[in-house]
Image (cartoon, rainbow, N blue to C red):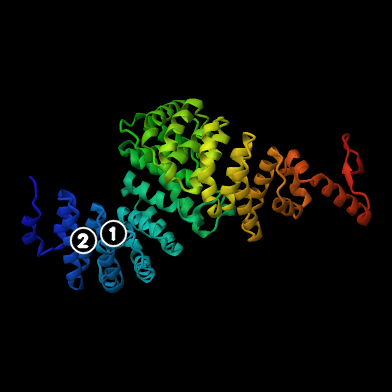
Amino acid sequence: MAFQTHQLWPWLIGLPGGRYVRVAERGPKDPAIWKRLTARADVIAHSLTPKQASLILSSMARSRHSQDNFLQRFSLKFAPSLVSQAEIIDLCGIVSGLSQLNVYQEELFAMTSQRLREVAPQLDARQVSLMANAFVKAGHLDMELFQRLLKQALRQLSKFTAKDAAVMLNAFSQVPDFQVKEWDDTFLDENTRELKTTLEALALRLPDLLPKADLHSLALILNAFAQLQFVQKDLLDLMSQELLLNEEKLTPRQLAMVLNAIARLQLHEPRLIELLSSVVRSGAHALDPQGLCLVANASAKLQLGLETFQVLFVRIPKLLSRFSGRHLAMLCHAWAKAHIHNDDLFELLILPLASHAARLEAHEVAITLYGYAHFRKSPKELFDVLLERFGTLLAEQAVSDEDLFMVANALGRVGWADGNVKNALRKVSNDLMRYISVQAQATFGLQEDIERESASEEVEHGPRLGMGMNGSCQSA
C-alpha cells in the first residue's frame, strides 16, 4: 500500500514512541516523514518518558535517519534526567540509540557508566553485548564498567546467542587495553585476566551457537579473535567448517573481515582459502576502498596469487579519488609483500601519494617506500616529498625504530642516501645494526662509523673478547 505524505500528518500529531517503531519497521522511508517525526519529537522532548525516548532513538538508529540539532539538544538537556530514572531496558535503549546515531556527550556517558556499573549484575546477555558495543563505539572506555560487563557475561553465558557473542567480542576487540600479544597469566593485568576467563568460557559455549549463527556473526567472531590474537585451534577449525557450510553469500565487508582474520590467525584451511579466493575474484568489483585494502593485504599474506591481484587491480582506478593516504600506502605494501610486479599500479599511485604525503604517519611513509623499493623503483617526485615528511616526523620524534629500519633498508635497496635518515641511524646503538641490511649500511656509510666506534672503544677499554669459530676466547 502506497503512503501519501499528506495522509500521514493527522496520524503524526500524537507520536508515542511505539509509532516511531512502526515507521522504522514498516515504512514509509521518506526522509520528509522522518524530518516531521523528529521535529515533533523535539517539541515534546521535555515530556518524554525514558521508554518513549528509548523507542524513538532506537527507531531513528534502525531507520538511519537523524537530525543533529534535535539529538544534541536532547543529549544535553533532557537525556541526563531520563538516564537517572530509567529502567534497565530503557537505559540500554537510550545509550545504544545515541551511540548508533554517533551522538556522544562525555558527561552523559560518564553518568550512564556509573549507573550501569551499579546495575551490571541485572543485565541480560543482549544488554551486556549492547552496552559493550555502545561504549566502545562512542570511545568512552571505562575499564571498570567493562570488567563488570565481563563478569556479568560469564553469569549470562548460557543465554548468549551467536549474535550477542559476536557483538560483545567485536566491541572488546577494539579496546586498546585488551589487545595483548601474550595471553600467559604472568603477563596479564586484572582487566585482561578477566577478559581471558570470559574468552575461554565463551570458546566452550560457541560450538553450540555456531550452527545457528548467520554469516555476519561468524565474520565478527572470527575477526574479533584475530584482533585479540586469541587462538584456540579446535574452535577455529569449527568456524572454518561453518563458513564452508554456510549458504549465505559474503558481502564485500564480510569478505574483507574474514580474509583479514584468517591471514592474521594464519588459518591455512585449503578448502576455505580456495572458496575465499573464488569469492574475491567474483566480488572485487563491489569492494569499497577500505575493503579493497584489507583484502589485498590479506591476499598477500595468504599468497592468493597473480590472478587475484589482477582482479583487484582492475578495481583500483575506479576508487582512486576515494583512497586516503593510508589506503594508498597499504596497496603499495600489499603488492610488494605478495611479490606481484605491476608497473601500471605503481605509476598510477605516484601523484595521489605525493598529494597525501604531508599527512602520512611514519609507518605509512615506511610501507610506501618499502613497496616501491621492493621493485627497485624510486620516482624522484614521490621520494622527495615522502622523505621530507619523514624528516619532519624524525624531528618530532614520531618515528619508531622499526619504521626507521624499514625506511633505511628500502633506501638501501635503491641506493638513496637521505641525510635525515642517516643522522637518525647514527644515533642507533650498534647492537641494533643487525636489523640494517648490508646494502643500507653501505648506502649510509654505516660500516665506517661502526668500525670507528669499535676502534675507539678498544682504545678506551682494551680489546673485547669474543668466541672464535672453535669456541675458544679470542680478541674480537
Q: Residue at x 15, y 50 (%)?
A: 27
Q: Amino acid at mark 1?
A: Gly
Q: Quadrant of residue 221?
A: top left
Near-viewer residue (353 or 293)? 353
- Tag of residue 338: none
From this viewpoint, is residue 56 visible? yes
Which quadrant: the N terminus? top left
Q: Residue at x 48, y 30 (%)?
A: 309
Near-viewer residue (285 or 156)? 285
Q: Residue at x 39, y 69 (%)?
A: 106
- Left or right of 50? Residue 10 is left
Circle 2 sits on which residue? 56
Which quadrant: the C terminus? top right
Near-viewer residue (206 or 32)? 32
Q: Is residue 414 above or below residue 27?
A: above
- Tag of residue 97: 1
Q: Residue 350 in the image: x percent, y percent?
A: 54, 42
CA distance separating discs 2 and 1: 9 Å
From this viewpoint, is residue 261 visible? no
Q: Residue furthest front?
A: 381
Q: Are marks 2 and 1 in contact (CB under 8 Å)?
A: yes
Near-viewer residue (343 or 182)? 343
- Left or right of 58? Residue 170 is right
- Left or right of 169? Residue 79 is left
